[in-house]
Image (cartoon, rainbow, N blue to C red):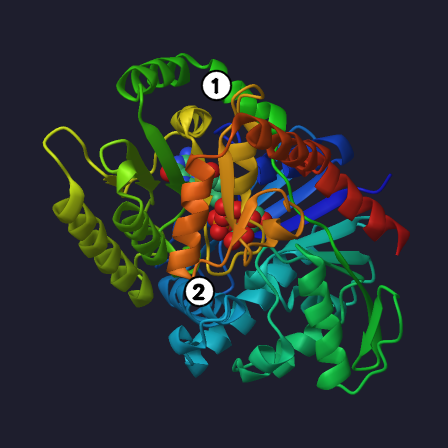
Amino acid sequence: MSRLIVISNRLGDPSKPPSGGLAVALNGALNALGGVWMGWSGTISDTAKSDGDVHTQQAGKVTLVGVDMNKAEHDGYYLGYSNSTLWPAFHHRMDLVENHQKDFDQYCMVNRTFAQHVAKFIEPDDVIWVHDYHLLPLAQELRSMGVTNKIGFFLHIPFPPSQIVTAIPGSEWWMEAMFSYDLIGFQTKADATNFRLYAERQLHEDIGGETDTVTGFGQSVRVRDFPIGIDVEQFRALLTHEEAIELRERLEVRSSGRRWITGVERLDYSKGLPERLKIYRQLLHKYPENQGTTSLVQIAPPTREQVEAYADIREELELLSGAVNGEFATIDWTPVRYIHRQVPRTRLAALFSISRVGMVTPLRDGMNLVAKEFVAVQDDDDPGVLVLSEFAGAAEQMKDALLVNPYNIEHTADALQRALHMPLDERKERHASLKKVVEEGDVVTWCRDFLEALQKV
Ligand code: GDG
């Protein structure tokens, strides 16, 4: 079996146990196969050389390679082109896209630097797995250095329709570069189709029938959906931690006769947070029986605060949650509990498990793992209901959630009302089907399927 080389924007901290499912799955595959994980160390150092300072550390069969960045690189590659150009555009927010040549130049340079560093560790039989939009052109850089190994790429965020792709400054360059991969994995069939249609519409290629192979720029790449999952057992096990047990007990006492609607996501404009508060406000207006009995708990930890669009969304959310509370709160009932801090995972699991509704209503999302985490910890005998945006990748698999269009405030408020008052039999039936999807498509399966497909190319 070949060794595995993983390259992602951020290298996990090996001194801490991996918290997310992705780190668990990648660590699992790396430990089984041996290999290298390379990414940004998390350090911004003004003394970092323009070609990056590199630190290596051995953890069993895995070599961890952390690359430092200087401020110009971090600003241009990470805050700039990755998160102010690609992220908004891939989430259909062309109004937020910034276009700065210096950001694009840093993006190209950092990708080249990453390729130069990782090339030193690559052995002839290794397979290489590159992650996410920060590193779209990495394979082409490696090919130009003579690397002939199999290289796969997985995109964690949505892949937009071709008209959006062509509107992104720099896209013709990295679209061509993407054809240097052997395999590209997307979250959904819809994303994979968008990629194929780009080849047909922009490159005038014949994409033929049901084949996974897409041709462009004289090269061919395999393209398929690999929906990511969670580590189901690890997430469920959080409920046995003392902190989770204690929180559940406290919430259960407080919530006798009350219902919780829960939302958890980074404070990102793609997650539809202002719309969620408007939907909840509409629920309280249209169905006043929920006043005094139903609360929305919204956890939204800060993210990418140096990017301007994120400061704007924070302000909007604070105004809206204040307004809903001002309008509806009573002395002994708070409608919205808005927490703008990171909450420990044990507490998240406990909160999901006592919630009547999981409200996962992004305006656009690659997959959305919160939807799967919510389902994983429901009580089979009295499960909560998942209200899920049709614009989350997860909607392609989780068809027994209540699927909603979060832009339609009125209809989504109706769906929320339906979820809050759904009879037990229907809740159980929907939950059983969703649980099967989550268990059968866990993160270990995702990782194995991708690597098997890459080996076979
Ligand atoms: C990208 C794509 C795709 C959230 N708040 C807290 C916290 N979280 C955890 C959640 C979940 C994770 O962060 C978020 O994952 P998502 O999938 O929901 O979203 P993104 O961060 O945008 O991830 C996405 C994913 O990549 C994987 O491919 O699904 O579409 O955008 O695990 O529980 N965790 C803790 N405290 C919090 O306050 N501890």
- In the rendered view of the protein, which quadrant contains the C terminus? bottom right
Q: Amino acid at mark 2?
A: Asn
Q: Is mark 2 within 8 Å of ligand 1?
A: no
Viewer-side label of 2, 1 = 1
Spatial CA distance of label 2 from label 1 is: 34 Å
In front of the other: 217 or 53: 217
Left or right, residue 413 beside residue 202: left
Q: Quadrant of residue 161?
A: bottom right
Q: Is residue 295 above or below residue 274?
A: above
Left or right, residue 275 beside residue 443: left
Secondary structure of the residue carrying tag 2 is helix
Q: Amino acid at mark 1?
A: Leu
In front of the other: 455 or 113: 455
Q: Looking at the image, which residue is at 49% across and 77% down? A: 105
Q: Is mark 1 within 8 Å of ligand 1?
A: no
Left or right, residue 21 beside residue 354: right
Please give the residue where the numbered disc 2 appears in the rendered image.
Answer: 83
Sequence-wise, the earlier of marks 2 and 1 is 2
Q: Mark 2 touching mark 1, by CB under 8 A?
A: no
Rendering coords of residue 157 (x, y %): 57, 58
Looking at the image, can residue 268 be seen? no
Q: Report the disc number at residue 239.
A: 1
How many other residues sit within 10 Å of disc 2, few (<14), some (14-19) or many (≥20)? Answer: many
Rendering coords of residue 123 (x, y %): 79, 50
Q: Looking at the image, which residue is at 60% across and 49% down? A: 394
